[in-house]
């Protein structure tokens, strides 16, 4: 019999004699047989619970840590107990800390040996709240986690789902750099923009979802999100006005969900799905699979901006390559120039935070 494994949108057939899943390198085989340790910080929250479930289902995950605060509405221990009953190989553990605890002092057992740390954490923006105030709060939350990762799992990929991503990721990347660590280990999760764009293209064109992969570049908020529909075969005959409408829908998709939930929630399930897609890509690369490509917001030199979302290749050490944008249309070129100005300001806010702080 042939075992087929699906990783994101990638399917491959594997010989039945290899344990767990197939591999394309000796180190990959060993890693997959042993499995990876993954931590979800905020694992008892609205995104964290379904994200933890999806990661526990990944055959590459042998150990899953659900990390949250003691004040979480659902205890981390309850989430871990629930997940421990599903039929997967993952051993699930819970870790809960008080809100004033320093993760670097408390989370050693949880984070030591982690290969991937997913961080759906932070507070939502309140009506009328200044973005700078939100950044100050959420960058502080992210710093607490990143500081602990720098000490206890410095080689782990740290995938941040902490708003505002456009500022928080540069802040944490620069703090890693100041600490003498690899800033490319800090990854901003923007896959939700790709997931949404793919689904919207499918709805408009009827093209099979497995044949659609919309490049979404730039940043992860409003007008900084740029889907490159000109590079999508299924969109070749779609009128220009429809392209612009879809572009705007991808930008505003988060608000679409908030409104549908009548202000009582945001995009949690689709965000968890997208976060798991990124997580699976990271682990596939770490396992030795070749050519694992995904979109993420990372340190970059493909434009004049130091951080940018684009296609990346994941390998044995995390990000191996940041891909150029490719050919873009006149409309996309205009949008790109406009978004750079907004994104630059948001990046600078993150760099300012990093200049005023250091990791312990």
Image: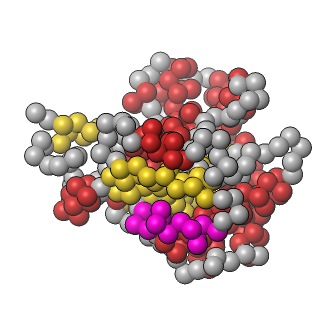
Picture coordinates of residue 112, whole percent (x, y): 44, 68
Which residue of the protein is positioned furthest toward the right in this rendering? 128
Q: Position of 273 compared to 26: left or right?
A: right
* Residue 343, quarter of the rendered image: bottom right
**Residue 56 sits above or below residue 149 on the image:** above
Residue 112, magenta (yes or no): yes
Q: Name the residue rendered at 56%, 33% in the picture.
A: 269
281 or 156, which lies in front? 156
Q: Which residues are magenta?
A: 102-114
Residue 212, magenta (yes or no): no
In this orientation, does residue 178 appear?
Answer: yes
Q: Name the residue rendered at 73%, 49% in the picture.
A: 123
Picture coordinates of residue 171, whole percent (x, y): 68, 66
306 or 74, which lies in front? 74
Q: Dominant secondary structure of the magenta stretch?
A: helix
Picture coordinates of residue 174, whole percent (x, y): 63, 72
* Residue 136, quarter of the rendered image: bottom right
In this orientation, does residue 306 appear?
Answer: no
**Residue 246 sits above or below residue 58 on the image:** above
For the C terminus, which image quadrant?
bottom right
């Amino acid at each position: 019999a042939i075992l087929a494994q699906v990783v994101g949108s990638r399917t491959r057939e594997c010989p039945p004699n290899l344990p767990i899943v197939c591999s394309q390198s000796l180190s990959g085989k060993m890693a997959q047989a042993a499995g990876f340790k993954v931590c979800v910080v905020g694992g008892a929250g609205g995104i964290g619970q379904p994200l933890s479930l999806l990661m526990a289902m990944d055959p590459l995950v042998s150990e899953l840590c659900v990390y949250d605060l003691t004040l979480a509405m659902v205890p981390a221990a309850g989430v871990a107990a629930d997940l421990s009953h599903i039929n997967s190989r993952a051993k699930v553990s819970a870790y809960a800390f008080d809100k004033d605890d320093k993760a670097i002092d408390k989370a050693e057992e949880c984070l030591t040996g982690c290969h991937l740390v997913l961080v759906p954490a932070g507070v939502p923006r309140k009506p009328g709240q200044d973005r700078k105030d939100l950044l100050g709060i959420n960058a502080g939350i992210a710093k607490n986690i990143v500081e602990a990762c720098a000490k206890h799992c410095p080689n782990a990929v740290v995938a941040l789902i902490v708003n505002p991503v456009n500022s928080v990721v540069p802040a944490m990347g620069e703090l890693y750099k100041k600490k003498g660590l690899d800033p490319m280990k800090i990854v901003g999760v923007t896959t939700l923009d790709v997931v949404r764009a793919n689904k919207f293209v499918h709805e408009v064109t009827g093209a099979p979802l497995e044949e659609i992969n919309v490049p979404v570049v730039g940043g992860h908020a409003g007008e900084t999100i740029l889907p490159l529909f000109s590079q999508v075969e299924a969109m070749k005959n779609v009128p220009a006005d429809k392209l612009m409408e879809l572009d705007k829908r991808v930008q505003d998709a988060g608000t679409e969900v908030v409104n549908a939930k009548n202000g009582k929630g945001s995009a949690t399930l689709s965000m968890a799905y997208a976060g798991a897609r990124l997580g699976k890509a990271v682990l596939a690369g770490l396992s030795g699979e070749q050519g694992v490509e995904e979109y993420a917001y990372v340190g970059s030199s493909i434009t004049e901006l130091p951080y940018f979302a684009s296609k990346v290749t994941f390998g044995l050490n995390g990000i191996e390559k940041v891909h150029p944008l490719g050919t873009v249309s006149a409309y996309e070129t205009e949008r790109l120039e406009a978004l750079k100005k907004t994104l630059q300001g948001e990046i600078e806010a993150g760099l300012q935070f990093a200049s005023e702080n250091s990791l312990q």
